[in-house]
């Protein structure tokens, strides 16, 4: 997992976003639990 400041060019300038790159999709309930555990405004799950 990585945490980045989204939509900004300034360090610490916007909402932090959690990024978890997945090799495969998880069940919706698990991804929701992960997002809630991170407790950030945004959590994204990109898959290559």
Image (spheres, rainbow, N blue to C red):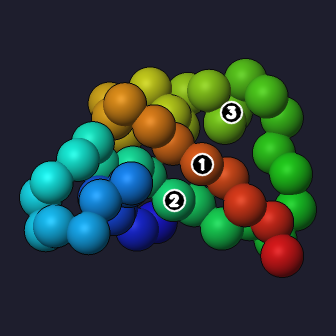
Disc 2 residue crowd, few under 14, some 14–19, many 20+, Cα 10 Å: some
Disc 1 residue crowd, few under 14, some 14–19, many 20+, Cα 10 Å: few
| CA–CA distance in space, label 2 to label 3 | 15 Å
| CA–CA distance in space, label 1 to label 2 | 5 Å
**Residue 28 located left or right of residue 17:** right
Q: Secondary structure at mark 2?
A: strand
Q: Is residue 16 visible?
A: yes
Which mark, residue 19?
A: 2
Nearest to viewer (mark 2 / mark 3): 2
Q: Secondary structure at mark 3?
A: helix
Counting residues from the N terminus, which is met first, the one under dot 3 or under dot 1?
Answer: 3
Question: Does the residue at mark 1 contact the one at mark 2 (Cβ under 8 Å)?
Answer: yes
Q: Position of residue 41 (x, y in %)?
A: 37, 31
Which mark, residue 44?
A: 1
Task: Identify the residue under disc 3.
Answer: 30
Q: Does residue 14 sit above or below 46 in this rendering?
A: above
Q: Does residue 8 sit above or below 38 in this rendering?
A: below
Counting residues from the N terminus, which is met first, the one under dot 1 or under dot 2?
Answer: 2
């Amino acid at each position: 997992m990585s945490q980045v400041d989204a939509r900004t060019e300034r360090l610490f300038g916007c909402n932090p976003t959690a990024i978890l790159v997945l090799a495969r999709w998880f069940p919706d309930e698990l991804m929701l639990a992960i997002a809630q555990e991170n407790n950030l405004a945004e959590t994204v799950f990109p898959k290559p």
